[in-house]
Image (cartoon, grey):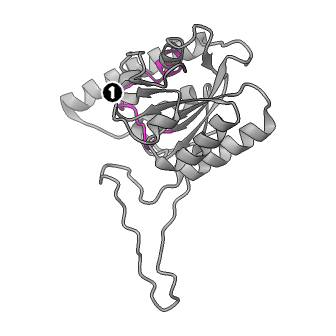
Amino acid sequence: MLRSSRPPPRSSGTFGSTYQKRLAVSRKQSLKLARELDPPPDDENSFYGLWDFGNCRLPPLYVVGSLIPKINLCLQTVNPLYRMCRMNSAIGNPNFAFIWQNRDVLNKQWDVKESKKRKIRCSVPICGRLIQSSNNAEVAYERKYDVADRMLIQELLCYVLANRTPRNILIISDDCDFGFPMHILRERGYRVFLMQRSANLRPLTQIAQHAWAWVDVVNGLTRPFYSLPNA
């Protein structure tokens, strides 16, 4: 489980006071929803979720306790019996506000882990130069070269090896590194659904049987923007 000692930001003035009030309301709603969420044991209709939360983010004041119910509603547009597993995997940078502000709520629904960091340097011993530059936006708490996708693929492998059922996987990411694992799972009879950042048709999208835009999911819109024929 994720443990963080990061204190909340100190703000002053009217804006800071308003933000803290809205944050308190959001946390209260999230905790209430998390207490009410008591899913039944996993079965053949449960989906194991893998969430790259640095790739598919939430707004800072988002009611995090509503996330699993909203995802369930999306899954149930395909089959009314589909739902998320009792515990799912989430990996990324814990310094995002929507993570450390809601870590107690998230830990009830997600096995949250901090992603590792890496740097790629020139392989010539005398070179010593950094040869991979970050294409991440320079935003607050951004860390360069996070490898959440590789860690999530390891989590996926461990899950598949340890569990014969359910054979349903939900990938929440935009990263093309998931393409090959998704293809292998499809070939072996797994249901593989995708939630990506936006409703853009990409090669990764077309491997999944159904795909949703993450921005739609967090706003309560439930219809997939892409579905394979006869899926």
Q: Residue at x 36, y 19 (%)?
A: 219
Residue 100: tell me if it is visible.
no
Between residues 75 and 146, which one lies in front from this camera angle? 75
Q: Residue at x 63, y 35 (%)?
A: 186
Magenta segment boundaries in residue numbering? 52-69
Image quadrant in which the N terminus is located: top right
Image quadrant in which the C terminus is located: top right
Between residues 10 and 87, which one lies in front from this camera angle? 87
Mark 1 surroundings within 10 Å by alpha-carbon count, few (fewer than 14), some (14 through 19), many (20 or more): some
State the residue lying farthest toward the front: 229
Numbered label tally? 1
| As drawn, 38 above or below 189 | above
Q: Is residue 49 left or right of residue 71?
A: right
> Residue 25, percent across and down?
38, 17
Q: Residue at x 21, y 30 (%)?
A: 15
State the residue lying farthest toward the top: 80
**Considering the numbered disc 1 on the image, is that residue within a helix, a strand or a loop?**
helix
Q: Which residue is mark 1?
A: 20
Q: Amino acid at mark 1?
A: Gln
On the image, which quarter does residue 223 sit in? Answer: top left
Q: Is residue 76 left or right of residue 136?
A: right
Between residues 4 and 171, which one lies in front from this camera angle? 171
Residue 58 highlighted magenta (yes or no): yes
Residue 118: tell me if it is visible.
yes
Q: Main secondary structure of the magenta part?
A: loop
